[in-house]
Image (tube, rainbow, N blue to C red):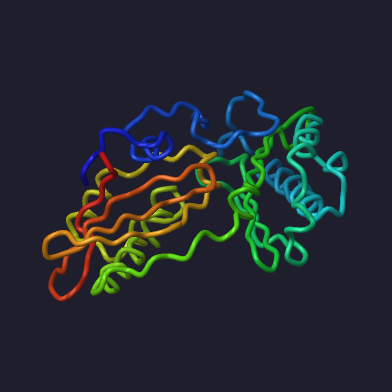
Amino acid sequence: MTRPRSLPAALACLLGLAACSGSRTPSTPTTLGATQRAPTTSATTSRGALAGQRAAVSQFAAAYVRFLNGADPANGLPNATSSVRALAGRAGPIPSARRRGTLAMTQLRSAMGANDSYLLAARDDAHTFYAQITLAEQDGRWVVVELTPPDFVQVLAPAGPPRPAPPPGSAAAEHAARLFLHGYLPWLYGQAPVRAITAATTGLLADFKAHPPRVPPTMQSLRPKVAAITMQRRGPGWQALPNISDGHETYELVLTVAHTRGRWLINNLSTPR
């Protein structure tokens, strides 16, 4: 895989090309109610304490979804610090004019590599919203001390202009690029194993296995997706230029798509110079 000279900060961190100390880099989302503390590890979290932590985050998450629906006030969020409540209130619920039906929680799971952090997903009839919740034990009880709220601007952004017609003959190569990105992007953000990546050559997969991404816990709440793909001829094959948006920043990748043994496969990945 060609290593670029310059990258968006978040992508450079994921690819291991930049030092990413702690759980936050300048490119990760702003966190509400941040508190410096030593991370809780599995060795120090007893089974009873873990049960208490999960009960606390479940109560908070259910109340937070009601708040996003506009049903409950932010100052009523349970098991949370006053700063989290205040800043959640400033971030606000989903604007009523933009909601499509009632928001419902669809997922609440532990963040990979962080025993005190959870990922929340909630969906209405048209959108999925993601948030990250982090807890700490204070005075013998678990409370929410950090909250990364949904990115309303990204999720509620209006549809862009109609996509121009793709070049003739590019459909199969573009399909291969989309299959590749369907597995590659979750792997890049620590949300799927490398075996989820398809439509890639064995050499490229070996490079990924040898250079796994380094994913800070706060970046695991991001949900990268393909905003658009431009296809252009490159010799006997194609070059796919996808724009990737993760809810915090947008960047471009360059995929080389070659016809190998009767199939279109990605054999190289880089970013624009």
User: How many numbered tags mark residues here?
Assistant: 0
Q: Is residue 24 left or right of residue 150?
A: left
Q: Residue furthest top?
A: 36
Can residue 142 be seen at all in this image of the molecule?
A: no
Which one is nearer the viewer's eye here, 155 or 42?
A: 155
Could you say where residue 24 lies in the image, as x and y percent from the top left? 52, 31
| Left or right of residue 225, residue 5 in this image | left
User: Image height check: is 107 above or below 166?
Assistant: above
In the rendered structure, the answer to whether residue 172 lies left or right of residue 237 reads right
State whether residue 3 is above or below residue 264.
above
Residue 149 in view here: yes
When asked about the image quadrant of residue 62, the answer is bottom right
What residue appears at the point 26 percent right and 46 percent down from the top-left corner? 270
* Image location of residue 77, percent across then percent down: 83, 43
Tell me where residue 111 appears, x and y as whole percent: 56, 46
The residue at the point 64 percent across, 40 percent down is 148
Image coordinates of residue 256 in percent, x first then y, are 21, 57
Image quarter (top left, top right, bottom left or bottom right) of the C terminus: top left
Q: Residue 31 sits in which quadrant?
A: top right
Q: Quadrant of residue 182?
A: bottom left
Image point (75%, 29%), residue name = 138
Q: Residue at x 41, y 59 (%)?
A: 228
Comparing 67 with 146, the one in front is 67
